[in-house]
Image (cartoon, rainbow, N blue to C red):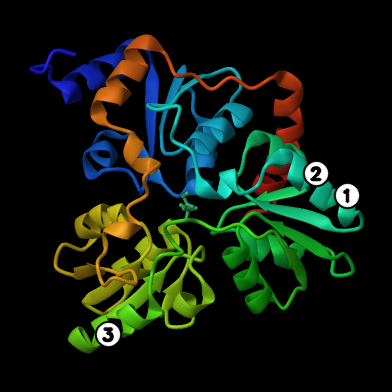
């Protein structure tokens, strides 16, 4: 790649030429968020992907998000900057093992977090994201037990706030598991006025000290609207790019891990995407998301149910 190439300008040109829309998650590098047509949480990004009239969706997030876009918009070309941008939650829940888990609990409703493969979605009854999980769980018939996969922390949090009994798949997110409640409490002595915000993929030890728990979108809204001026952020730190844009006068402090440092919370999968790779993906129309039609239709059912049940 020519080192002198103006990537922003070239991406803008390709966007016009190919009638592309660039969707980015809040965990992407700031420069990627800045060139996106839309930045959102998992639910808002799914809705955008379903509604777009672009010919090409350039999905800057992780692979399962690109898959969701393709499942909802099969006629669009969906490209992702790096085919290796996976997800530890997805990796923790392989389709064969998940099928056996379902077979062991035949009378249960399978509620599955969107952070999973298309195959696992296809084996599920309804998909949820962290912004709609509570409403969807509350709306499920009360006489039916629930299987929740793959994030045990989000599942346990849903159990606590809805009172619904659930059998949890033992998966977790490698980055949200790293935060240390002990180190956060220490940090609070330095910033006694700071509010703590946390993503529900964090373990209970973190959620129990948080002032607000929610999806990336909900955390952003909370921080923007709160009167407090300082916040400790227990989720992937690239979200702070949007916080700083929304409220430049406020102070955002990344939550530390057990060693007191904050680097552990950078998602290595989200970090695979770069401006160069976005440019190349648009030029080459690859890597492209391809999903066999029978699998797509099976995965579409629980995703559609999610969109219908989302407030
Ligand atoms: P939300 O953006 O829905 O909060 O999800 C975050 C996430 O898990 C990304 O992998």
Pointer 1 residue: 103
Residue 122: percent from left, percent from top: 74, 37
Camera-side residue of 113 and 99: 99
Q: Residue furthest front?
A: 259
Dot 2 corresponds to which residue?
99
What residue is pinned by disc 3? 186
Say which element carries label 1.
helix
* Picture quadrant where residue 272 is located: top left
**Corner quadrant of residue 278:** top left
Instruction: Characterize the local packing of mark 3: few (<14), some (14-19) or many (20 or more) Cα atoms within 10 angstroms.
Output: some
Give the secondary structure at mark 2: helix
For residue 242, the mark is none
Q: Position of residue 201 (x, y in %)?
A: 51, 63
Q: Give the left or right position of residue 130, taking residue 25 as reference.
A: right
Residue at horizontal 34 percent and vertical 58 percent from the top? 265
Q: Do labels 1 and 3 touch, CB within 8 Å?
A: no
The residue at the point 51 percent across, 38 percent down is 65
Q: Residue at x 47, y 60 (%)?
A: 215
Residue at 32% over, 43% down: 28
Quadrant for the N terminus in the image: top left
Q: Is residue 87 above or below residue 281?
A: below
Q: CA distance from mark 1 to mark 3?
A: 45 Å
User: From what the image shows, is residue 202 above or below residue 116?
Assistant: below
User: Element type at marker 3?
Assistant: helix
Which of marks 3 and 2 precedes in the sequence?
2
Instruction: State whether label 2 is within 8 Å of ligand 1.
Output: no
Q: Residue 234: x percent and y percent?
A: 37, 67
Residue 268 figure quarter: top left
> Is 253 on the left or on the right of 93, as rendered?
left
Q: Mark 1 and mark 2: span between their CA atoms?
A: 6 Å
**Circles 1, 2 touching at the beta carbon (< 8 Å):** yes
Marks 1 and 3, the one that precedes in the sequence: 1
């Amino acid at each position: 790649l020519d080192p002198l190439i103006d990537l922003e300008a070239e991406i803008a040109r390709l966007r016009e030429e190919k009638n592309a829309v660039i969707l980015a998650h809040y965990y992407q590098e700031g420069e990627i968020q800045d060139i996106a047509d839309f930045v959102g949480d998992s639910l808002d990004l799914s809705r955008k992907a379903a509604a777009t009239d672009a010919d090409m969706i350039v999905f800057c997030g992780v692979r399962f998000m690109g898959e969701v876009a393709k499942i909802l918009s099969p006629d669009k070309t969906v490209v992702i900057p790096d085919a290796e941008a996976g997800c530890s939650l997805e990796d923790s829940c392989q389709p064969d093992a998940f099928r056996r888990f379902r077979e062991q609990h035949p009378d249960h409703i399978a509620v599955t977090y969107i952070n999973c493969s298309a195959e696992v979605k296809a084996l599920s009854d309804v998909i949820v994201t962290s912004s709609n999980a509570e409403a969807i769980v509350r709306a499920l018939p009360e006489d039916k037990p629930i299987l929740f996969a793959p994030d045990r922390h989000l599942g346990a949090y849903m159990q606590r706030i809805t009172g619904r009994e659930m059998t949890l798949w033992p998966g977790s997110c490698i980055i949200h598991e790293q935060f240390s409640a002990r180190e956060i409490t220490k940090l609070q002595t330095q910033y006694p006025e700071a509010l703590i915000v946390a993503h529900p993929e964090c373990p209970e030890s973190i959620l129990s000290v948080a002032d607000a728990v929610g999806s990336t979108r909900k955390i952003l809204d909370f921080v923007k609207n709160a009167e407090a001026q300082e916040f400790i952020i227990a989720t992937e730190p690239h979200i702070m790019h949007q916080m700083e844009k929304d409220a430049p006068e406020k102070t955002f402090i990344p939550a530390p891990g057990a060693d007191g440092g904050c680097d552990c919370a950078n998602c290595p999968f989200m970090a695979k995407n770069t401006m160069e790779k976005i440019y190349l993906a648009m030029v080459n129309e690859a890597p492209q998301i391809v999903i066999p039609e029978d699998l797509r239709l099976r995965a579409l059912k629980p995703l559609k149910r999610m969109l219908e049940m989302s407030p």
